[in-house]
């Protein structure tokens, strides 16, 4: 069974984007490939329990087990050695991706205090969009009372191609609330 957001994308959003930008071939429309959620846990250098709680929280948020990322180089000023676990990330595709976007847009973002929309300046040259979250407590899956270590995260929406205008329109039609200039 397809998630409602994926069904909406396939039935409505593709047609709207095709008409708005006068795209002749459906395959030329930018398509959302994956959503990457990344937590850099710098405090894990001194205390591995911080990384364990971050992995546990990210598992609840994403619905799948994250990959633990390790440092690539040693930096003595930060007491960082090579191959030391310092973060975690998860890549969501297909059904889980659309379910996460639906939860993120409809339940998580409205829980942010004084929220006026996400910045529309966070696009890169290839049309990918990134948003930073200050604390994972805004997700309904996380119990703020049991939160041991508040941690931020980066969420990146990766497209297969396309200019910023087309990918921004797709995200807007998926429900992403962009800030008004």
Image: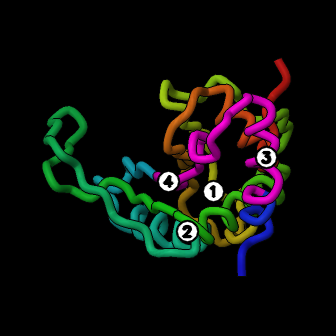
Which disc number belongs to residue 15?
3
Mark 4 or mark 2: which comes first in sequence?
4
Badge 3: residue crowd in 10 Å (few <14, some 14–19, many ≥20): some
Element on which disc 3 rests: helix
Residue under the image location 74 percent in, 39 percent down: 18
Q: Do the residues under discs 2 and 3 have CB atoms within 8 angstroms?
A: no
Q: Do the residues under discs 2 and 1 have CB atoms within 8 angstroms?
A: yes
Q: Is residue 90 above or below residue 39?
A: below
Badge 4: residue crowd in 10 Å (few <14, some 14–19, many ≥20): some
Q: In the rendered image, which quarter contains the C terminus? A: top right
Q: Is residue 21 above or below residue 8?
A: above
Point out residue 163 in the picture as x, y percentages from the top left corner.
58, 27
Q: Nearer the viewer, mark 1 or mark 4?
A: 4
Which disc number belongs to residue 136?
1
Q: Quadrant of residue 132?
A: top right
Q: Quadrant of residue 2?
A: bottom right
Mark 3 or mark 1: which comes first in sequence?
3
Mark 4 or mark 3: which comes first in sequence?
3
Question: Which residue, given by chain and number where applicable, does mark 2 sit on?
Answer: 57
Q: Nearer the viewer, mark 4 or mark 3?
A: 3
């Amino acid at each position: 069974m397809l998630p409602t957001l994926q069904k909406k994308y396939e039935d409505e959003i593709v047609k709207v984007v095709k008409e708005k930008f006068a795209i002749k071939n459906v395959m030329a429309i930018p398509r959302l490939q994956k959503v990457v959620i990344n937590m850099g846990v710098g405090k894990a250098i001194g205390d591995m329990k911080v990384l364990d709680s971050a992995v546990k929280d990210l598992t609840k948020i994403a619905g799948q087990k994250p990959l633990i990322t390790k440092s690539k180089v040693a930096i003595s000023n930060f007491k960082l050695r090579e191959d030391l676990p310092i973060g975690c990330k998860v890549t969501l595709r297909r059904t889980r991706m659309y379910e996460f976007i639906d939860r993120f847009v409809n339940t998580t973002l409205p829980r942010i205090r004084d929220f006026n929309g996400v910045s529309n300046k966070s696009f890169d040259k290839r049309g990918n969009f990134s948003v930073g979250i200050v604390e994972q407590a805004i997700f309904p899956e996380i119990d703020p009372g049991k939160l041991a270590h508040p941690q931020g995260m980066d969420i990146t929406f990766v497209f297969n191609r396309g200019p910023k205008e087309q990918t921004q329109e797709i995200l807007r039609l998926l429900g992403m609330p962009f800030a008004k200039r």
